[in-house]
Amino acid sequence: MGLTASVLAVDAGNSKTDVAVVTAGGDVLATARGGGFRPPADGVEQAVDALAEAVTRAFAAAGVTSVEHVSACLANADLPVEEEQLAAALHARAWGARVDVRNDTFAILRAGVAEPLGVAVVCGAGVNCVGMRPDGRTARFPAIGRMSGDWGGGWGLAEEALWHAARAEDGRGGPTELARTLPAHFGLGSMQALIEALHLRHVEPARRHELTPVLFATAAGGDPLARSVVDRQAEEVVAMATVALTRLDLLAEPVPVLLGGSVLAARHPQLDDRIRELLAHRAPKAVPRVVTERPVLGAVLLGLDGVGAAPTAHARVREHFAA
């Protein structure tokens, strides 16, 4: 008797999409990778079309045409109404009888915990935080940017570094080595030259993200202003985690606080140490850990949760992705 696929797991980020077709017993029948998932820029239907290419390849490799349950963890699913819209679009593709759409931060959280319990803070290009309990309760933030109260992430840190460096050079702000190190990264001699280069697109605006590692290097060199920006990022990470733990009544329990995304995964000593120091003070029971597991694993595990799979299935899937 042939294997029956129970779960289609989708982890769709801004830059890439990973999908997996899995049985209820935890056997991974096929995986595939596709392009980025950007509904705000491309529209919902075109974004789902991009998912369809990877799903079609995975289904063909698995020898199936549909599954019981679709577990989709999607970038830009920041609000419940967006989750509903995306779930409707995925359901219309008839990939599975049931469709569960969540923000992609939930995939990072579930990948790093043995059961659906804990909080994850992701600091990559932007910043986001989610939490969950086994009873289905969740905590989350809109994570739309400054208008929803967010600060930081790689893009935000680069913008903050530029702001301080510009003001340091023209006298509106205090001195900082950033006024030298940021333009030097692009081979330029002053902030004025860098500002002009960015404004006139002699340096592509998308390359601003390259300035975040320069900020951390300048902080590591002892620059007080750069260090203050890094400390503020730590404050923001811990503030989000503490609020999520509080909302879920988890402050008094030893639960994981997972740290993910490119900025946190880089393990910058100042940022990492300050986050752990602040957590120890504000949420002393929390157990911080940097996530190294692939997010698609989290989407698979959420799907297995959804079909009531046995613990052995979860273990088998973890072994597959660890290998």
Image (cartoon, rainbow, N blue to C red):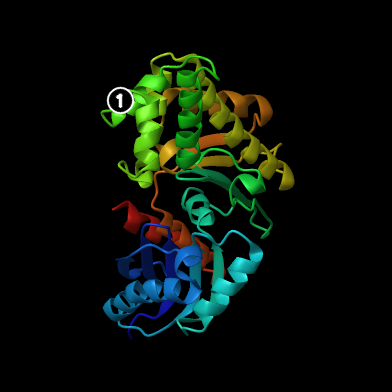
Q: Nearer the viewer, residue 121 or 190?
A: 190
Residue at 46% in and 43% down? 260
Please state the horizontal and vertical placement of residue 200, each as a whole percent of the image.
Answer: 36, 43
Q: Is residue 301 above or below residue 176?
A: below
Asked which secondary structure carries label 1, the reply is: helix
Q: Is residue 7 visible?
A: no
Using a 10 Å C-alpha cutoff, classify the residue at mark 1 as few (fewer than 14 neighbours), some (14 to 19) or many (20 or more). Answer: some
Above or below — where is 189 with respect to 106?
above
On the image, the x and y values in percent for residue 294 come to: 38, 52
User: Residue visible at 56% across and 41% down?
Assistant: 256
Q: Nearer the viewer, residue 131 or 6?
A: 131
Using the rendered view, name the quadrant where residue 184 is placed: top left
Q: How many marks?
A: 1
Q: Residue at x 63, y 53 (%)?
A: 142
Q: Residue 217 location, x and y as percent?
A: 37, 23
Q: What residue is shown at x 48% (from left), y 48% (from top)?
A: 112
Dot 1 corresponds to which residue? 184
